[in-house]
Amino acid sequence: MNRLIIVLLCCFPALISAQTSLPVPLNIRQAIDKGSRTITGQPGPHYWQNHADYTIRVHFDPTTRLVSGSESIVYNNNSPDTLRQLLFKLYPNLYKKGAARMMPIRPEDLTDGVAISNMVIGGQAADAARNNRRRRDADGTDLPVPIPMLVPGQSTTVSLDFAYTLNKTSHIRTGQIDSGAFFIAYFFPRIAVYDDIDGWNRIPYLGPQEFYNDFCNFSVSITVPGDYLVWERAISSTVATCFRLASTNGSTRRPPLTAS
């Protein structure tokens, strides 16, 4: 028995030593080798992030719960890679019929998803037939769109129109609160993160997760019926501010809200 105890005790230092050196996943090792990351987890000398500027105009109709709008995007490829597609995140597609999800949704809240139209990329109109298919082409909350080559250091422009119906119940961060109150979140098509670890972030939004998005600039105009208040939260120069807008008749358009 004594000999057995001695052997086990002699093994403990080796076990402890082995536990202090954890395996590094291949994708992270590749980023370390390229100098965009370090073994400590800090950014490396060649670290980069892609960036976009959004100009968004959105309209909400409380009667039909239709959210519709248009957006223009300037997308900057700061990566060392040549991009041949853009991946859009359509988060409201969590409520799309047939979409994968990890939270229950009532049948009456299922929709046809986000409709995308009039898409123009780099000054070239998207193929009309494909444009008509975009609603069903989306794989859940992900919509890949082929583009002309976007080389490192280059930027491209995107413009599009979008529309979807806000959920009435089945609240998952968004939806109708009561007969006169609505919480509208992650409503606009957004270009996914392209990073040095996985390339495009193709992990779908299934309901309970937090979001992984680029740091971007936003200029947003909101139009609602005149008897509604609009509360919006934006961050500009690292200062969080809440805005309220009230009107008694007609339509109200919120002046552009700029956020960084």
Image (cartoon, rainbow, N blue to C red):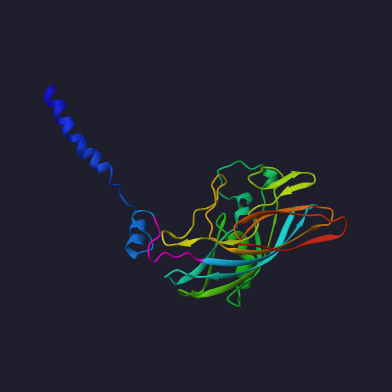
Q: Residue at x 41, y 64 (%)?
A: 47
The extreme top residue here reads 1
Where is residue 222? Give x, y as percent.
Answer: 74, 60
Q: In the orientation shown, which residue stands out farthest toward the right?
A: 249
Q: Residue at x 87, y 55 (%)?
A: 248
Question: Residue drawn at (81%, 60%), measured in percent from left and top?
Answer: 252
Which quadrant does the C terminus fall into? bottom right
Question: Magenta residues: mostly which secondary structure?
Answer: loop
Residue 248 in the image: above or below residue 154:
above
Residue 249 located within the stretch drawn in magenta = no
Q: Which residues are magenta?
A: 42-50
Q: Position of residue 126 (x, y in %)?
A: 60, 73
Q: Is residue 65 above or below residue 135?
A: above
Q: How many marks?
A: 0
Is residue 44 rendered magenta in the image? yes
Lateral position of residue 136 relative to residue 167, left or right: left
Image quarter in which the N terminus is found: top left
| Quadrant in the rendering for residue 124 | bottom right
Q: Nearer the viewer, residue 105 or 89?
A: 89
In this picture, residue 36 sits left or right of residue 94: left
Give the camera-side residue of 160 and 5. Answer: 5
Q: Residue at x 38, y 60 (%)?
A: 37
Task: Give the image location of residue 15, x and y in percent.
Answer: 23, 38
Farthest residue to the bottom: give it: 123
Task: Residue 54 in the image: state x and y as whole percent.
Answer: 62, 66
Q: Is 260 placed above or below 12 here?
A: below
